Image (cartoon, rainbow, N blue to C red):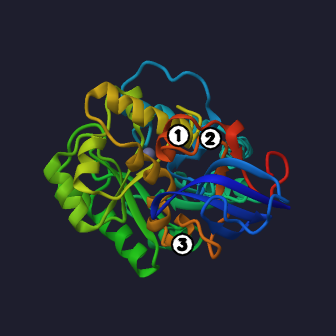
Amino acid sequence: MSLIVEGSIFDADGVRPAYVRFEGERITEIGQIGTDSTRGRIRRIRGIVTPPPVNSHTHLGDAVSTREPPPISFREMVGPPNGFKFRLLAAAGPREKREAAGLALARMAEEGIRAVVDFREEGVAGVRMLRRAAQGLGIRVVALGRPLARPIERAELFQLLAIADGVGLASAREESIETRRTVARACRATKKTYALHASEERRERIDDYLDPKPELLVHMTYATRGDFETVRDAGTSVAVCPRSNALFGRRPPLATMEKLGLSVLLGTDNAMLHAPSIWRELEFAYVSSRLSGERVSSDFLARAALVEPWNWLGLPRAARIDPAGAVAPLVLRLPADDPAYQIVTRVTEQVIVRPGRRGRGA
Ligand SMILES: [Zn+2]
């Protein structure tokens, strides 16, 4: 099935007008509009061609609850080990959790997501559940598990790392320096990822969350300019979740992160609080930055969903639209002007075309 998209490309190299020809999922030609080799014989649509988005922070086990969260404090809501969320997880059966996580993943697949970075609680069983839930959906799941025993038990930690892509801890406030060091050392030894939440509820000391050095920090809502400079210079990326922060009356300082040139990734956080839609997250991030008076560019946000995460995952080719591309791109049937602005404000499932796919494919 052939298709030509005339319009623009948004990818790691920026924005440019172009036509892109697809054979099935694969790109076979890219060029200046009006110069394609087909002389009008192939179906053509107007739109924007982009790398597929990544949801860079989720807790998909939480999808088991969809009720409006009770009016309790942040700590009572998601604080380990006995917060509201952990009681919900403990009360739900494994099948119930797997089905809920599977539905959340299927919804993300419908919205074009091709990779997700999940903080999966509940030890080895929690990661196994997530792996089963993701089967056959075409989403790469980066499962950052969390060992249960404290102090850390070596056998459990290495059993976890054998099936997980790394460890995602709550934060340096909840986990001792011994736990963090043991976990980070094991992650390094097995070439896996060590990540944790930081400065979400209040500012934390930078030495606490950068020692040992993680590959990813989540939130950084209360970080200062100086903290961000240190994090940037350490080469650590930051995942932000503006809708989740807003529910608790706070927001990540996106404009500062943009100005300082941080590597920022976008995520949707706890699945019990929001639909895991990266497009809704993008629009909220953009609009709420205007509301706060600290503007962030649409380009910066679109990159946080479509480009930076692929670099962070070590797959920079997936963030480039070219015939040798590593991952099938998305086509968005939207105006080709200002593609980053279209991406952050106008994407709904209805405008997503996945060349070579059935259903809404082309
Ligand atoms: Zn989180």
The amino acid type of the residue labelled 2 equals: Leu
Secondary structure, mark 2, is loop
What crowding class fits label 2: few (fewer than 14 Cα within 10 Å), some (14-19), or many (20 or more)?
A: many
Rounded to the nearest whole Å, what is the CA distance between mark 3 and mark 2?
24 Å
Frontmost residue, 2 versus 122? 2
Q: Which residue is mark 3?
A: 317
Is the residue 317 above or below the residue 117 in the image?
A: below
Is the residue 98 above or below the residue 308 in the image?
A: above
Tell me: 290 left or right of 117.
left
> Which residue lies at the image location 21% right of the left edge and 66% below the top edge?
233
Rounded to the nearest whole Å, what is the CA distance between mark 2 and mark 1?
7 Å
Secondary structure, mark 1, is helix
Frontmost residue, 275 versus 87? 275
The amino acid type of the residue labelled 3 equals: Arg
Rounded to the nearest whole Å, what is the CA distance between mark 3 and mark 1?
23 Å
Q: Quadrant of the N terminus?
A: bottom right
> Which residue lies at the image location 67% right of the left edge and 65% below the top edge?
35
> To which quarter of the image does residue 274 belong?
top right
Q: Which residue is mark 1?
A: 342
